[in-house]
Image: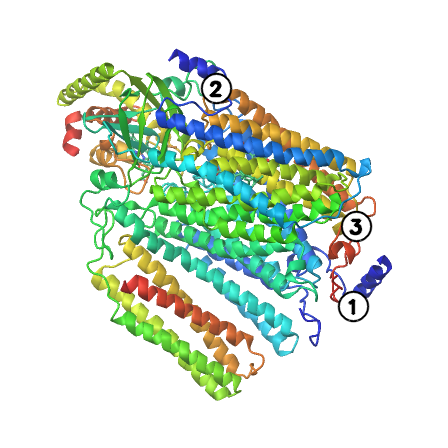
Amino acid sequence: MSSASDQDYYVPHGTHWPIIGSVGLTLSVVGFANYLHDTWSLTPTLVGLAILFFMMFGWFGQVINESLSGLYNKQVDLSFRWSMSWFIFSEVMFFGAFFGALFYARMYSIPWLDGASNNDATAQYLWPDFEAAWPLLTVPLAEKYEVAKAFIGPWGLPAINTVILLTSGLTVTFAHWALKKNDTPKLVYWLAATVALGFGFVVLQGYEYVHLYRDLNLRLDSGIYGSTFFMLTGFHGFHVTMGATMLLIIMIRAAKGHFTPENHFAFEGVAWYWHFVDVVWLGLFIFVYWI
Amino acid sequence: MLSMASAQAAYQLNMTESVTPIGRQLYGLHMLVFGICVVIGVGVFGVMAWSIFHHRKSKGAVPADFHESTKVEVAWTVVPLLILIGIAIPATGTLIELEDAKTDAEITLQVTGIQWKWKYTYVDEGISFVSNLAQSSRDVMKDPTGNENYLLEVDNPIVLPVNKKIRFLFHADDVIHAWWVPELAVKQDAIPGFINDSWAIIEEPGVYRGQCAELCGKDHGFMPIVVNAVSEAEYQEWVAGMQAEAAAAASAATQEWSMADLVERGETVYQANCSACHGPTGAGIPGAFPAITGSSIVLDADPAAHIDIVVNGKAGTAMAAFKNQLNDIDIAAALTYQRNGLGNSVGDTIQPSTIAAAR
Amino acid sequence: MSTEIAHETAHDEHHDHGPAKGLMRWVTTTNHKDIGTLYLWLSFIMLLYGGAMAMVIRLELFQPGLQWVEPHFFNQMTTMHGLVMVFGAIMPAFVGLANWLLPMMIGAPDMALPRMNNWSFWILPFAFAMLASTTFMEGGAPAFGWTFYAPLSTTFAPASTDFFIFAVHLMGISSVMGSINIIATILNMRAPGMTLMKMPLFVWTWLITAYLLIAVMPVLAGAVTMMLTDRHFGTSFFDAAGGGDPVMFQHIFWFFGHPEVYIMILPAFGVISAIIPTFARKPLFGYSSMVYASASIAILSFMVWAHHMFTTGMPVAGELYFMYATILISVPTGVKVFNWVTTMWKGSMTFETPMLFALGFIVMFTIGGFSGLMLGVAPVDTQYHDTYFVVAHFHYVLVTGALYSIIAAFYYWVPKWTGHMYDERLGKIHFWWSTIAVNVLFFPQHFVGLAGMPRRIPDYALQFAEFNQISSIGGFAFGLAQVFFLYIVIKTIRGGEKATDRVWEGATGLEFEQLPSPPPYHSFNEPPPVK
Ligand code: HEA
Ligand code: HEA
Ligand code: CUA
Ligand SMILES: [Cu+2]
């Protein structure tokens, strides 16, 4: 809103990146749909994703160049901030859908299948043997879904992972402080720590998945418990991977000296994203693993 | 029956009047809300019309410059609010009553929605049958002119006594359906895996017709409901008749059936129960429903797989387990017909006893 | 003033070379006007496509019996008609209007993130191509209604469903990016002095709509993702056998779906709030109460979703709550209607085409709102639900509501956009032709619905024949009227009487007061003065 800023709002002229992105995106989803129907191999999907990554590098690269050459004034910076915050909000809502499914299953569908509320006939005629419980180790129709032998408690790996993510939230904040003091070596150091913690989390999560599948028979298809568990933790893990990758890129850029104490929106955006991933994990830890 | 026909011949503008006490309440509530809307509409559109005619530039109207008036704005917030409260109070009472199906129910009728037919089970009487769209409607789909009750006729109507509280239990085997009979003011979703209930006290004998009211796939428009409301005595007679019929069928199922008898009966069973998906000629619908003509499962000299898919269905597909819908004779007949009709000629028969063993 | 404006144009031409030439101009453009034009054309094409499918529906329903299409194909038509109209015709039209108008209304050089703006648009043709291609796949297009209830859309759906799912994902990405852009533009790009409470109502309603969009599109994406995993990866979200619930799908869907219908009406409110004062030559009666009413409608819209589910067997307490919350929406909506009427009161009205469509909107949207109120009364909704009464309700709010406002907006702003006046006589014919036809089309549907005709059926019992025939005739007439509209649109773009900068005697707002008609490629390189 400030015409008082040093120069005009930067309005780019023409760009070919979006259309490339659209082609990549479309190819990857069309490819995947065909892959699901066994009509295509996975190659088109991978090509589509490759195009998408090419687009992202190109597009972001252009933005970085423009930023470094000082084309962006404060107002542009503010546009980026608004956009990043509301993008994160949209992500929150995406997770909201899956949390909603979790709460619905726990609070409504499972008790109802066991006759709660106005469902006495459901239990009487359809599922006389089913008993409501959470985590769910028996499902109403046992023939259809193979269930888990046991479930996972919160105080093993999940607790360790919680500590890891919380710590990474701290380290990224230390990095920010270092950046504000223009202390590049410290900045890179703390970012490296954050990236390591992030990928460490992913590795541990992968290890846990193997354990669940192999030893406990807790799988994506073992009833609603497995479904909600893997969808929530899976999408979260995916977001951690993305976040850690972005942090890695930010680290490289930091090492190249792209950021100044006054001007480092890219760093902050990624840091916000990282905190968001952190907070989602806390929700997961509480509602998926703990209570 | 006659009164129904005459009521339907004249096309109807308003909601169907009900023959149940709760249905009459719903009708009253409908008229109340409708009336309120009409009154508000007349007011709002009246004011609008007035200014359109009188405050137009061509008549030399000069724009006034008033705006913002807290008084007016409070009024047009509060008055509608009060009107809404006036609607909510009777609606709340009616809704609570509508949802209480369990108290004092005298007859329990279990209704199962299946693509694209209804199965009815009289829980205490031990009667169970499937109700399909009548052949008379199927035959005239190209031009139904003059076919009375087109699409609203079934092969096996349900019979219910008047003046008794009937509790309906709804559920579905495959997708969501909804059982709706306007005159009974019952519309309730039939959902796979859950049972919903609803109720009716039918106060007048008569034939009441309805339809499935939730999109359930290809033949959603073709799963009608017919309720025959009769006196208590007639109802008891019907129950006894149905029970005797079931016993007769059970004994017939132990006998050896001839190929001709099976194929003849099988054609009827097939057209009523299978043709919706596999087509009247057995051609199926590519990409959705397999053809029966030339199907390797059907042509296999060993009937085991054929029997299995029809008796137990195939989980995760539209192919239902027909052991829950048809008796042994009907399944045996349908199978024999599929093997020896529709362009197939395996040459063997499937006996009801084989089906009984496969259950 | 107009000399001043002209001077600015020249200045602009001088240091900006205007649009590139050829097809690539449209593919690579970052200009809000170009992108707005792209959106508007896409939406018109989708209107014709969705409308053509509606014509198939009306043709089959012209008389009882199955004459023209198979039931399975009929269901595909219903489904695709709903999806294409909602996601293809109405939503992109409003985004197109936002693109054209927001920067001009708030005095900004362009949208906040022009490159992302391009991507928001250019995802859509791909998404709709994918969606449309399902019609030609084995097993046919999705046939489970635009509401795609599980398990009809999971276990029992054709293979093409996966393409539909991904198309919805793409639309979601596009909408979220578009909304983020709109929020950033409105919050960050206003000219000095353009305080929030000075913004035109169209800007306000779009700001609120954008929030609705970023809140609910991701939820829709979540819903289709769960569908995908239920279909292919063995999850049991919507399957009671594994502890899930088919009705859970409906809750998630309508948590998106109900705000979605307000997404399609809030910008319409903004359009009407711009047009009525102009032609009544009198300021809007209650500006701030209009802002608060819009916000209340948006907030309430998150709390009423299960009024689409009164027959699913929810516990009574839930039904009561959703009934109360639903009918409460009538209050803020009433505030809007009353405000428009009072704005006209003692005005000095003229009735050019935009005003006619706006007046048509007020009357017919209110009729649709009344039937909505009736539907909101839970016990009676058990009898209205899934009948043509519902179909009548939502076409009154969508066609004579949302679509009418879009048409009104076109007539109102097209002289500004192109510099040409449309042909007033043709515009008036378009209005009367459409309005008579649309009522012949949808009013009788109230009657057949109350009399017991379920929706989504290809064939019906004989007692519904007369009204269906009337409705179909109205449908064909309304369809032809929109072909006529296409002619008017093209004619106006290609030429016509020169429009003045102010265009309408009573017009207000930066786009009319500060910019020539047509406006320069980049509207405001210098922030305009705001009164
Ligand atoms: C633009 C889209 C739009 C809009 C604005 C609305 C507005 C409203 N809708 Fe509608 N609705 C749809 C689009 C829309 N709807 C669609 C698409 C469906 C069907 C989806 C599907 O199943 O496919 C649907 C279905 C639908 C149902 C489900 C019906 C069923 O399937 O059984 C219900 C039930 O409550 C409902 C209610 C309402 C209400 C209460 C309003 C209110 O907002 C209306 C408020 C307005 C007024 C009331 C008029 C003006 C007010 C006054 C003049 C003030 C004074 C008035 C009083 C005090 C009464 N709608
Ligand atoms: C969002 C906006 C929107 C709009 C604008 C429309 C516009 C129209 N709609 Fe529809 N409609 C929906 C949204 C909309 N609809 C939704 C959400 C559903 C629910 C779907 C579901 O149940 O899942 C629905 C369902 C629906 C049904 C119920 C189908 C069923 O239950 O089986 C019907 C039936 O009459 C119908 C008719 C029409 C008609 C005649 C128009 C007309 O206004 C269309 C006019 C436009 C044109 C006709 C285009 C221009 C003309 C041509 C391309 C040339 C061809 C012309 C001729 C041959 C004359 N619509
Ligand atoms: Cu069964 Cu519709
Ligand atoms: Cu709604």
B106 left or right, relative to C194:
left
Query: Closer to the observer: label 2 or label 1?
Result: 2
Residue toward you, C142 or C197: C197
The disc label shown at residue C419, or none: 3
Tell me the SS state at disc 1.
Answer: helix
**Badge 1 amino acid:** His
Tell me the SS state at disc 2.
Answer: helix
Image coords of residue C97 (percent x, y)? 65, 51
The residue beneath circle 2 is C463
Tag 2 subunit: C
Label 3 and label 2: CA atoms lie apart by 53 Å
Q: Residues within 10 Å of mark 3 (few under 14, many from 20)?
A: many
Query: Is ligand 2 within 8 Å of the beta carbon of the residue shown at mark 3?
Result: no
Image coords of residue C156 (percent x, y)? 36, 41
Residue at 40 percent of width and 19 percent of height? B137
Q: Residues within 10 Å of mark 1 (few under 14, many from 20)?
A: few
Label 2 and label 1: CA atoms lie apart by 69 Å
* Residue positioned most to the top: B2
Tag 3 subunit: C
Image coords of residue C395 (percent x, y)? 56, 36
Tell me the SS state at disc 3.
Answer: loop
The residue beneath circle 1 is C15
